[in-house]
Image (spheres, rainbow, N blue to C red):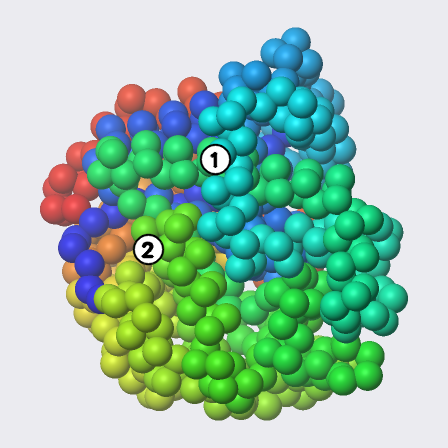
Amino acid sequence: MSFQRASGVLLHPTSLPSRFGIGDLGQAAYAFVDFLAKSGQTLWQVLPLGPTGYEHSPYIMNFSTFAGNPLLIDLEQLAADGLLDSNALTPLTDVDLEKVDFEKVIAHKTHLLKQAHDRFLTARSPDQDAKFAQFCQEQASWLDDFVLFMALLEANGGKSWHQWERAIARREPDAIKAQTEALQASIQYQQFVQFKFFEQWQKLRQYANAKNIKIIGDISIYVCHNSSDVWADPELFKLDPNTFEPAFIAGVPPDYFSATGQLWGNPVYNWEQAQKTDFAWWIKRFQVTLQYVDIVRVDHFRGFEAYWQVPAGEETAINGEWIEAPGEQFFTALEKALGTLPILAEDLGIITPPVEALRDRFDFPGMRILMFAFGDDANNAYLPHNYVRNTVVYPGTHDNDTAIGWWQQASATEKQFLAKYLGYDSPDAIKDINWLLIRTALASVADLAIIPLQDLLDLDGRSRMNDPSHNAGNWRWRYRSSDLLTQELSDRLLALTQLYSR
């Protein structure tokens, strides 16, 4: 579907300020929504919200594509609910206010979440009990598998599910029944944290919607091998039938980000099996995502037309091959099940005419990145004069450097072409490159424009969220204080938003 002309800000909730070492769904999230509203913004884009594992990537190592991340739960709301004592909410000290220390955060928050669960078990009201039961019933299609998976993961010392006792790995009914009974305490805790995440997120989303702000969420095309998704439905993935390890893994060939491509490690899909079920798992995935968000950005959209499949054991993504996927059949089934699809297509990378045809067949807006535009070629698809209206434009995304960081590293050719294109005598005449790119994005004909908060805050490359060429150290950036969202900043953004009819 096409969208009305609008703009918004890209910020993952983990990047919000808080006293507990990581952004959450508390006061700072509401202050951010207020800032968006005052600034004339109607969109808030977030990254996938699921519980993360290795290196805390919200895209590659989620334990579930359906569940929420317990680290985002606001402890102060739990105290307000009577589930924690306010004096127990000690701030997390000795941490960098601009970086998440996940190890410290996990230990600190998990301890308090378990305290809250203990009190919930003994002191919950009839109303809380009814809401909890309703949540567990309504979300049972994914929740039952997820909570048992997480309980088993803990009981097995964090080992991947394919290394568990074979009867459990194969989900034999008697083994599942026995473990469900044995791990009840852990299962109930996992149900509780999902219930509280969902409750707090829905409250925040309703607050945003009431201020005319829609939330753009992300569906990562792939899921983690060590996840409840693969454990519960292994036939939907290309796995070795004996070891349950991936037979092929996902990635992309050499591109802008890496000369050897990107090797993500996720198992690829068995699309033939998905077709036999009329894409039931995929439809459920979109249905649940739309309980969290208003618009879905489909990450790596080109994988629905053809995907890069690399044999397991390869050290880089070079020796892969393109395999066709039934994208048109899938999106037709999804549209039949859900109606008009509020989808944005992340169509970056190696995009072929069939990928563009699939995108346009369903009227999905594609993406344009200004940082990719200035390679001294007027035919570059990322230059604003080449845009169509049904597009979403960004100065850069979470995978790019900040605008200032990019400019500091840009080639002389890029700088010269950008200056010429935007009407400057030379690159030296350009001040505030981040605001120049913000203005260019907002002024473009693209229906939607999304600005990373780092660019609004004049931050350099030290505040980059993710560098796809490095596995370690990503996803940690956050801003220090809601005080940075000043009235002056709001007024500046509002003026540009109004000037360009967004």
In terms of depth relative to the viewer, which is nearer, 51 or 34?
A: 51
Q: Quadrant of the N terminus?
A: bottom left
Q: Is residue 8 left or right of residue 412?
A: left
Q: Which is closer to the viewer, label 1 or label 2? A: 1
Q: Earlier in the sequence, mark 1 or mark 2?
A: 1
Can you say whether 22 is above or below 325 in the image?
A: above
Q: Is residue 281 left or right of residue 375?
A: right
Query: Which residue is at 67% across, 23% downward?
Result: 122
Can you say whether 157 is above or below 90 in the image?
A: below
The amino acid at mark 1 is: Lys
Query: Which residue is at 45% across, 23% downward?
Result: 27
Estimate the x, y position of residue 357 in percent, counting from the top left: 29, 84
Residue highlighted by disc 2 = 295
In terms of depth relative to the viewer, which is nearer, 277 or 154?
A: 277
Can you say whether 248 is above or below 450 in the image?
A: below
In terms of depth relative to the viewer, which is nearer, 38 or 497?
A: 38
Query: Residue 39: in sight, yes or no?
Result: no
Query: Which residue is at 61% across, 37% downward?
Result: 192
Q: Is residue 216 left or right of residue 26?
A: left
Can you say whether 264 is above or below 96 in the image?
A: below
Marks 1 and 2, how far apart at CA: 26 Å
Estimate the x, y position of residue 330 in percent, counting from the top left: 39, 80
Characterize the local packing of mark 2: few (<14), some (14-19) or many (20 or more) Cα atoms within 10 angstroms. Answer: many
Which element carries disc 1, helix, strand or loop? helix
How many numbered badges does the structure rendering display? Answer: 2
Characterize the local packing of mark 1: few (<14), some (14-19) or many (20 or more) Cα atoms within 10 angstroms. Answer: some
Residue highlighted by disc 1 = 131
Outermost top residue:
87
The amino acid at mark 2 is: Ile
Query: Which residue is at 56% across, 58% downward?
Result: 142
Query: Residue 320: in sight, yes or no?
Result: yes
Residue 29 has which mark?
A: none
